[in-house]
Each structure stands twice: as structure tokens, then as C-alpha cells.
Image (cartoon, grey):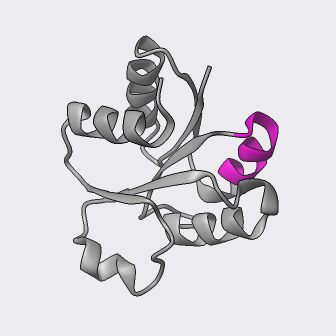
Amino acid sequence: MKTILVVDDELGSAEVLSLILEEEGYRAFCAVNGQLALVQAREVVPDLVIVDYMMPLMNGAEFSRELRRDPQFSHTKIILNSGLPEVAIRDQFDSYDAFLRKPFKVETLLEMVERFIGR
């Protein structure tokens, strides 16, 4: 079973998204900031991370850079999402596999997830 880590400081959004992913047959875990997400990533070893850009303590770009520094996660797929336009974020971090602008359709996200890690 493929594992997905959802990182978003809006816990309600992360939990709903995790439930949707579980209904689609994935194992899903949540973290409310980048620091907690790094700890959780080492515990659950996700195949894919869906991370919000704007978060306290450690934003999505900072988290993703730290994650990529660990050889264990060098090939982990990252979907970065934000209400900001992608062009505003790309200058700070461009090593994500896909960008999804909020608000997004769940169907669009599920298509990305399946394309990156299958079922």
C-alpha cells in the first residue's frame, strides 16, 4: 500500500484530504507543520508528500529542501500546493514534482497522485 504524508497547518483540511486518500486505497498521515512532518516522514517513509507552502515554523519550501537533503527521500515525490501563484514560489524552491494551486479539485489531485505513485 502506497503511503502519503499530507502537510498543512490547516489541520481540518489535512484530515479531510487524508480521509479521501484512504478511501482511494492509500495510507495517509498528517502533519501540521514542516518540523513535525520531517519527524513523521522518517517514521512512515512516504512515497509521496502533499505539502502546503505557507505554514508556520517551517514553510513548504523549507520542509521540502530538508526532506530532499536526506538520501532516503531524494526520490520521494512532492506535490506543493498554495493559494499563491506558482511563479511567486518557484524562485524559493523548484524541486517539487508538481504544483497545485488552491483551491483545487480533489479529482485533479487524485490524478496527480495516481500518475506519480500509482495505486
From this view, report whether residue 118 is shown above or below residue 99.
above
Looking at the image, the residue that sits furthest to the bottom is: 91
Q: Residue 2's x, y, as percent?
A: 59, 27
Secondary structure mostly seen in magenta is: helix
User: Which residue does the image show at 77% across and 48% down from the upper left?
Assistant: 39
Locate residue 96 relative to residue 16 in the image: left or right. Answer: right
Q: Is residue 25 magenta?
A: no
Residue 54: percent from the left, percent from the top?
42, 64
- Please name whichever residue, 61 or 56, is drawn nearer the observer in this view of the structure: 61
To which quarter of the image does residue 101 belong? Answer: bottom left
Q: Is residue 109 above or below residue 8?
A: above
Q: Is residue 40 visible?
A: yes
Count of numbered circles in the view:
0
99 shown above or below 86: above
Left or right, 28 with respect to 22, comes to right
Measured from the top left, where is residue 8 in percent x and y?
47, 47
Residue 57 appearing in the image: no
Residue 55 position, x and y percent, is 48, 61
- Magenta highlight on residue 41: yes
Q: Which residue is drawn at the image coordinates 74% and 70% (left, top)?
A: 69
Q: Residue at x 41, y 37 (%)?
A: 113
Image: magenta residue range: 36-45
Image quadrant where one finds the N terminus: top right
